[in-house]
Image (cartoon, rainbow, N blue to C red):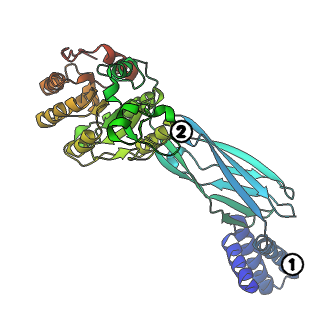
């Protein structure tokens, strides 16, 4: 086994000969051949010396057995599109002998920037070195980082061998999240607000929710009238604090969006959904993300109902980081989760709609406590046409009017509009307000 390892190390060393090493070896062999042909002993000595240098470098590098450990730390692990993240690398020499010069190279996708390379001087036994580099992406997504590659080289640069670690990490680039102002939307219900107090105040003694007595229950919760009626101990059930619920519906249909890249209507919709979701979670809402494909994040029983707001926010932002356009033609697959979700606030970020889809959304309005629709005028994202006035068209105005007549609070959105301003406008928006175009916007 030792001979096999040594042979494989030598083969790797010969494959790692640099241009300088190959040149020295070729020059040495040529000098040796010429010395025999010309009968020149001095030329033979020169040839042997030239050939011995790269061969000695191969032997040294092939038999180098450094025990080196590496670690990687991301700050932050979840970056926002367009903002920088820093990657910290640590290399530990866990052997009892010092290392030579180490060349480090970390593998990163080209979208994050050029591959970082570092030269580390001699690392003492049990010592370590730390380096860092920055990455940045304007495109959301999940990007692998690593594995870290370690290059071993001789002092003369004759031979260079690459050895790779196995560990890698993933940098998640989430959509841009904008801070939204605190507003009170039409039909909004806050679980700890005044409306909840009024509901409890109107509840009489006969409205108390009861259950059978269980060992360990506080006797002060015994409801004696019901105990006498049923012939067994009955206690008042503890009131569970009700939490306001919200659903953010994201329209990911490819046919409903225009434009390409970071400036497309779809990317604006994803950023809008992320901003609204984070804002509602910060206000105490139990919030879920729903797509036209019927996918719900957090999934029932995870994050949203049993985790913290930070857990739910992380799950939703991770899902939005990899959200892609779907091939669906309608929003029908999202209707069942909306029906089963019960009342609460519904915020929909919608692309192009036809009469049928608008009518179906109108019927869902009655099942929610409040409904706000960001309706994208996708024609304004279609290239240079966004510079022309009155690009909304009669069809878009008809969709706005149809949804408002169904009880939705509709916020028309054009390319370049500010999301915080639109969110603020939703507070005072009335369902009957007309849609006004801004010529030349």
**Which of the pair 371/85 is nearer the observer?**
371
Q: Position of residue 279 (x, y in %)?
A: 44, 27
Q: Is residue 54 at least partly visible in the picture? A: yes
Q: Is residue 36 above or below residue 301?
A: below
In the image: residue 35, left or right of residue 288 = right
- Mark 2 highlights which residue? 79
In the image: residue 362, left or right of residue 178 = left
Q: Is residue 152 above or below residue 139?
A: below
- Mark 1 highlights which residue? 45
- Secondary structure of the residue carrying tag 1 is helix
Q: Nearer the viewer, mark 1 or mark 2?
A: 2
Based on the displayed image, in which of its 4 quarters is residue 438 positioned?
top left
Q: Position of residue 122 (x, y in %)?
A: 84, 55
Number of marks in picture? 2
**Which of the pair 3/357 is nearer the observer?**
357
The quarter of the rendered structure image containing the C terminus is top left
The quarter of the rendered structure image containing the N terminus is bottom right
Q: In percent of the image, x 31 and y 37: which residue is there? A: 250
């Amino acid at each position: 086994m030792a001979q096999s390892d040594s042979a494989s190390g030598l083969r790797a060393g010969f494959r790692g000969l640099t241009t300088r090493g190959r040149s020295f070896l070729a020059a040495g062999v040529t000098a040796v051949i010429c010395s025999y042909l010309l009968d020149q002993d001095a030329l033979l000595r020169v040839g042997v010396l030239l050939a011995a240098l790269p061969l000695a470098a191969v032997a040294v590098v092939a038999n180098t057995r450094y025990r080196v450990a590496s670690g990687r730390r991301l700050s932050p692990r979840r970056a926002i599109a367009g903002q920088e993240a820093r990657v910290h690398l640590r290399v530990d020499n866990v052997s009892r002998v010092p290392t030579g010069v180490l060349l480090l190279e970390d593998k990163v996708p080209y979208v994050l920037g050029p591959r970082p390379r570092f030269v580390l001087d001699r690392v003492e036994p049990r010592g370590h070195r730390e380096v860092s580099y920055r990455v940045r992406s304007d495109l959301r997504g999940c990007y692998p980082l690593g594995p870290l590659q370690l290059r071993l080289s001789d002092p003369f640069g004759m031979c260079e061998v690459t050895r790779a670690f196995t560990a890698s990490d993933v940098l998640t680039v989430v959509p841009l999240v904008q801070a939204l102002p605190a507003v009170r939307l039409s039909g909004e219900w806050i679980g700890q607000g005044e409306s909840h107090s009024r509901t409890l105040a109107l509840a009489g003694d006969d409205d108390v929710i009861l259950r059978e007595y269980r060992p360990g229950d506080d006797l002060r919760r015994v409801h004696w009238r019901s105990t006498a009626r049923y012939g067994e101990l009955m206690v008042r059930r503890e009131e569970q604090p009700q939490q306001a619920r919200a659903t953010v519906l994201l329209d990911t249909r490819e046919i409903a969006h225009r434009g390409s890249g970071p400036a497309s209507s779809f990317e604006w919709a994803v950023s809008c959904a992320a901003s609204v979701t984070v804002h509602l979670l910060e206000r105490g809402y139990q919030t879920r993300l729903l797509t036209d494909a019927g996918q719900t994040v957090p999934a029932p029983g995870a994050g949203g109902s049993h985790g913290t707001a930070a857990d739910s926010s992380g799950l939703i932002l991770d899902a939005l980081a990899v959200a892609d356009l779907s091939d669906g033609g309608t929003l029908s697959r999202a209707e069942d989760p909306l029906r089963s979700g019960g009342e609460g606030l519904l915020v929909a970020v919608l692309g192009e709609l036809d009469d049928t889809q608008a009518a179906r959304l109108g019927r869902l309005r009655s099942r929610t406590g409040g409904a706000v629709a960001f309706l994208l005028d996708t024609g304004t994202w279609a290239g240079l046409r966004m510079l022309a006035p009155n690009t909304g068209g009669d069809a878009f105005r008809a969709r706005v009017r149809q949804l408002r007549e169904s009880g939705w609070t509709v916020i028309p959105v054009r390319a370049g509009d500010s999301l915080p301003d639109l969110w603020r406008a939703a507070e005072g928006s009335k369902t009957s307000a007309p849609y006004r175009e801004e010529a030349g916007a």
